[in-house]
Image: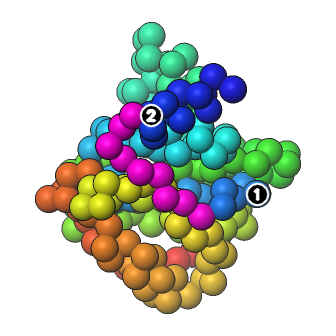
């Protein structure tokens, strides 16, 4: 209840407007894009808390050291060991099978830097877990943030990415100069 009140205060006094489709009713891979600033994290929490969505998000293990660890985990963080990232998929599969409804927030365009393409982990996780994808966004040009459509991936990577590109075509991110075009390094079959 406190989280929802904080979110409502954020949306009512802040300059951002929440524009969203209905919240997912089953576990989903929630894409957070364009990811161009640390403010994206605040907006993501405000969206999730307003819509009462339990979120988990992936972060590099170094974010969870010391006093930050308990805070990050309380906010839904899952530490990723870059030496063994496959463990994360297993945890997500277990959570999805337990009946818990949650959004696994993934930022496929990386960590707020200039990259030439998106990382394919979100696609692999969605296919392996059978979870749909929900398109979350931040758009500074319209000062809106929220959730777009939720859909099942088809396994036709190029067609799925065309659909994703179409949605994000007019979304600029918090810092538009850092936006990365939604394109995977290789859009052939992922397996």
Q: Residue furthest top?
A: 67
Q: Is residue 78 visible?
A: no
Predominant secondary structure, magenta span: loop
Say which residue appears at 38% left-offset and 56% top-offset.
144
Q: How is the image coloured?
A: rainbow
**Among numbered discs 2 and 1, the one appearing first in the sequence:** 2
Mark 1 residue crowding within 10 angstroms, few (<14) / some (14–19) / many (20+): few
Q: Horizontal and vertical percent for residue 91?
A: 69, 44
The N terminus - image quarter: top right
Q: Pick whichever, 46 or 84, lies toward us.
A: 46
Q: Secondary structure at mark 1?
A: loop
Q: Is residue 131 left or right of residue 123?
A: right
Q: How far apart in space, not on screen, are marks 2 and 1 (Cα)?
A: 26 Å
60 part of magenta stretch: no
Pointer 2: what residue?
Answer: 10
In front of the other: 191 or 149: 149
The magenta stretch is 13-21
Asked whether residue 19 is drawn in magenta, I would say yes
Q: Which residue is mark 1?
A: 26
Direction from residue 62 to residue 114 in the image, left or right: left
Residue sitting at 80 percent across and 45 percent down?
Answer: 100
- As drawn, the residue found furthest toward the front would be 12
Asked if residue 55 is positioned above or below residue 21 in the image, the reply reads: above
Q: Is residue 163 visible?
A: yes
Q: Quadrant of residue 62?
A: top left
Which residue is painted at 47% across and 52% down in the image? 18
Q: Position of residue 43 (x, y in %)?
A: 42, 42
The structure residue drawn at horizontal position 76% and vertical position 57%, both measured from the top left corner, is: 26
* In the image: residue 90, left or right of residue 167: right
x and y, in percent, of residue 114 in the image? 18, 57
Per the rendering, the mark at residue 107 is none
């Amino acid at each position: 209840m406190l989280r929802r009140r904080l979110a409502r205060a954020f949306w009512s006094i802040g300059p951002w407007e929440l524009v969203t489709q209905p919240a997912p009713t089953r576990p989903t891979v929630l894409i957070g894009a364009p990811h161009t600033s640390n403010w994206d994290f605040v907006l993501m929490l405000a969206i999730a808390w307003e819509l009462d969505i339990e979120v988990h998000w992936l972060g590099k293990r170094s974010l969870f050291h010391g006093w930050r660890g308990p805070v990050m985990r309380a906010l839904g963080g899952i530490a990723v060991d870059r030496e063994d990232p496959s463990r994360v998929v297993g945890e997500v599969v277990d959570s999805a099978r337990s009946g818990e409804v949650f959004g696994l927030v993934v930022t496929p365009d990386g960590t707020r830097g200039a990259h030439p393409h998106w990382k394919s982990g979100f696609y692999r996780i969605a296919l392996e877990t059978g979870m749909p994808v929900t398109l979350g966004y931040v758009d500074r040009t319209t000062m809106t943030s929220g959730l777009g459509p939720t859909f099942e991936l088809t396994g036709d990577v190029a067609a799925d990415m065309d659909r994703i590109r179409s949605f994000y075509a007019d979304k600029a991110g918090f810092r538009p100069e850092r936006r990365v075009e939604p394109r995977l390094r290789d859009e052939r079959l992922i397996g």
